[in-house]
Image (tube, coloured by chain):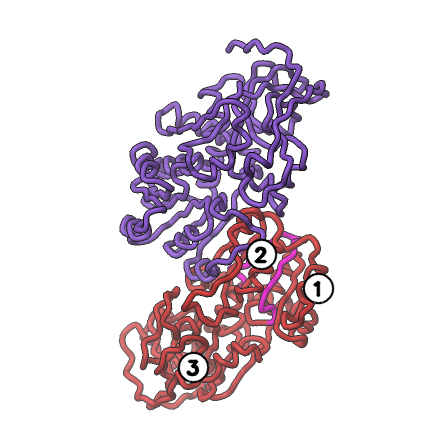
Chain colours: A purple, B red
């Protein structure tokens, strides 16, 4: 691979978090600034970001809630994943020209410590945008959570919420590969069609239509064995009440709940857990860093074999970042949302 | 062991379910009748019941809800566990004089099929009442659920609701035996004292006192690793919010919720599952029949070693049965509630 010829960077455009959102972050919570690049310290790498990632979890990082990671400090660069090309390395094992996926932040250039690097490759087996999506936390979440917590067995019915999304579309394809019957929920008729035509779901339903509950019931008259849920709320409550005995519920997100402060009320679910003998588990990808290489290699092979397809929704220019989460939560994108700034 | 000299039974007193309760069964939902005993069929045993069991799950069996077992038909004998002495056997492997624990129903005599027998012994290692309590589903639930779903590790904090009860008191002692720090919740100061003094809890709190949340927080400032819950409701919601990352929640009952029709509302908990990476599992003992002998043998050994103590609350006479569930849910008993009719 040819190392791109990036001239020595002097100025770094950064998207700062300047106001704390209570719900979904909007453009006014951010400010785009230009700052000089600090010199590299021992153990660091400098990367030119090519794709910035836009992830639902960023809402939690921007908010000041008890979360699985501390909130982004006001006035600092918005925490974000991204994929880029190494320009300079003072970190063992990484060389200029390597492709690095990690905690780049929403900015042109990232100075990364070892702990900021989630994966790196010298020999990409897929377009580098894939390393921020289907080979990034989205695909790895699908691979690791569906396997370890979903524990699929051939013939089982697997329900996936956000089935057309960056995680859900991979879960559907993995479920198919395991011999399960994947069923999807998504937010438009077009996405429901894509789930079946492109991602191999047995059936998929638009939850904005009034008849989705009946139609899902017809598609899985005996109930659901695995529920891979990223939305929570009413859809979760409905899914729990469809679970078969000894079913597995994998909680990978709670995207339908705009704010947890104050905590919203809903149906009590402990009886479902008990009477159906469910196993309901939470999954946060960053707990599983030691398994990333294995997950990436497995996903790369599926892509090469033509058994795993993925969509990307790529916006262009760092100016798109401040409004990107609002658009993500509006559900307009099909596939992984990225911002190309390379 | 000498076989008791029971004269040939002619009349069988039975407690019938005659009205369907919507909440906790009360005396007026039952009727005590006397019926002739039908002759034994091939493959059956006749047992003279000695102890009838009173279990929280009977509320669910009496109600007409979707449950993990079908409801008791109106006009039939109330489904119940019990322990008794075999009078006559046409079942392989069982002889007169054996002690049998199983689905006897609330009646003087039981004609049991193979599927009704949960355990049997010719050489009891404990008083026979124990086979309906600490060696019955209560102790076996504690042993099997705490081990397989709680996955205890030394040093962990284990919170147990209904800590002085027939299941909870065993969980506390098993947690102690595993090197965990058992913490209990119970419904009176006297029971809280018994948890510490008799069942080896590090601390136990009366949830009817206003300060239990603060005191529990002081006892487990770093949170809870294992939550063994049998009550659901507010106490469950509170416990979930104290869980440490990767904590295990074992749902063995929902005793605090008087009725699930209509489904009650509560705090949404999917965010706790996700952000704390919980593993929240339901446990129903009757799924685990193949593990019963192993559980009983392990519990018998702990009793013989003096490492497992248990209390029994024994009422006398079958006339006590119709009001026993109401008294059980009032929380008046200490230890396993049984009715002696031998």
Judging from the image, mark 3 belongs to the subunit labelled B
What residue appears at the point 34 percent right and 34 percent down from the top-left corner? Answer: A199
Which percent across, then down, holds residue B61? 39, 72
- At mark 2, the secondary structure is helix
- Total number of numbered labels? 3
Earlier-in-chain disc, 1 versus 2: 1
- Whether residue A27 sits left or right of residue B212 in the image: it is left
Asked whether residue B9 is in view, the answer is: no
Magenta stretch bounds: B142-164
Which of the two discs, 2 and 3, sits closer to the camera? 2
Relative to residue A262, is residue B13 drawn left or right?
Answer: left
Local SS, label 3: strand
Q: Which residue is denoted by mark 1 in the rendering?
A: B215
Q: Quick check: marks 2 and 3 in contact, CB under 8 Å?
A: no
| Rendering coords of residue B7 (x, y %) | 38, 90
- Residue A150 in the image: x percent, y percent? 43, 45
Label 3: few (<14), some (14–19) or many (≥20) C-alpha neighbours in 10 Å:
many
Same chain for labels 1 and 2? Say yes or no.
yes
Q: Is residue B153 magenta?
A: yes
The residue at the far front in this view is A28
Q: Calculate the distance from the C-alpha at mark 2 to the C-alpha at mark 3.
A: 41 Å
Mark 3 or 1: in front is 1
Relative height, residue A60 to residue A211 (above, below): above
Front residue of this view, candidates B2 and B203: B203
The secondary element bearing badge 1 is classed as: helix
**Residue contact between numbered discs 3 and 1, judged by CB atoms under 8 Å:** no
| Quadrant assignment, res B19 | bottom left
The residue labelled by disc 3 is B49
Give residue A213's position: percent from left, percent from top: 33, 52
Q: Which residue is mark 2?
A: B240
Q: Nearer the viewer, residue B230 or B148?
A: B230
């Amino acid at each position: 691979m040819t190392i791109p010829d990036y001239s020595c960077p002097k100025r770094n455009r950064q998207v700062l978090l300047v106001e704390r959102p209570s719900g979904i972050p909007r453009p006014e919570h951010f400010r785009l600034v230009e700052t000089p690049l600090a010199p590299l310290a021992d153990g660091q790498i400098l990367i030119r970001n090519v794709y910035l990632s836009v992830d639902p979890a960023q809402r939690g990082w921007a908010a000041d809630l008890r979360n699985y990671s501390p909130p982004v400090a006001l006035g600092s660069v918005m925490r974000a994943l991204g994929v880029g090309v190494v320009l300079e390395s003072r970190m063992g094992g990484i060389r200029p020209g390597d492709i690095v996926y990690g905690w780049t932040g929403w900015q042109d250039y990232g100075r990364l410590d070892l702990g900021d690097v989630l994966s790196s490759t010298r020999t990409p087996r897929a377009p580098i945008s894939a390393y921020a999506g289907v080979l990034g936390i989205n695909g790895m979440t699908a691979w690791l959570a569906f396997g370890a917590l979903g524990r699929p067995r051939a013939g089982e019915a697997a329900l996936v919420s956000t089935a057309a999304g960056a995680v859900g579309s991979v879960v559907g394809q993995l479920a198919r590969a395991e011999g399960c019957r994947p069923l999807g929920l998504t937010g438009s008729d077009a996405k429901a069609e894509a789930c079946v035509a492109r991602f191999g779901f047995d059936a998929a339903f638009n939850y904005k239509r009034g008849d989705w509950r009946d139609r899902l019931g017809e598609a899985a008259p005996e109930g659901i064995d695995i529920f891979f849920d990223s939305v929570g709320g009413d859809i979760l409550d409905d899914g729990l009440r469809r679970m078969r005995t000894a079913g597995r519920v994998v909680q990978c997100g709670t995207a339908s709940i705009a704010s947890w402060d104050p905590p919203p009320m809903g149906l009590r679910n402990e009886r479902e857990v008990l009477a159906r003998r469910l196993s309901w588990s939470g999954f946060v990808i960053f707990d599983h860093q030691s398994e990333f290489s294995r997950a990436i290699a497995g996903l790369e092979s599926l892509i090469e074999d033509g058994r795993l397809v993925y969509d990307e929704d790529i916006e262009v220019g760092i100016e798109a970042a401040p409004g990107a989460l609002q658009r993500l939560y509006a559900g307009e994108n099909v596939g992984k949302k990225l911002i190309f700034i390379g």
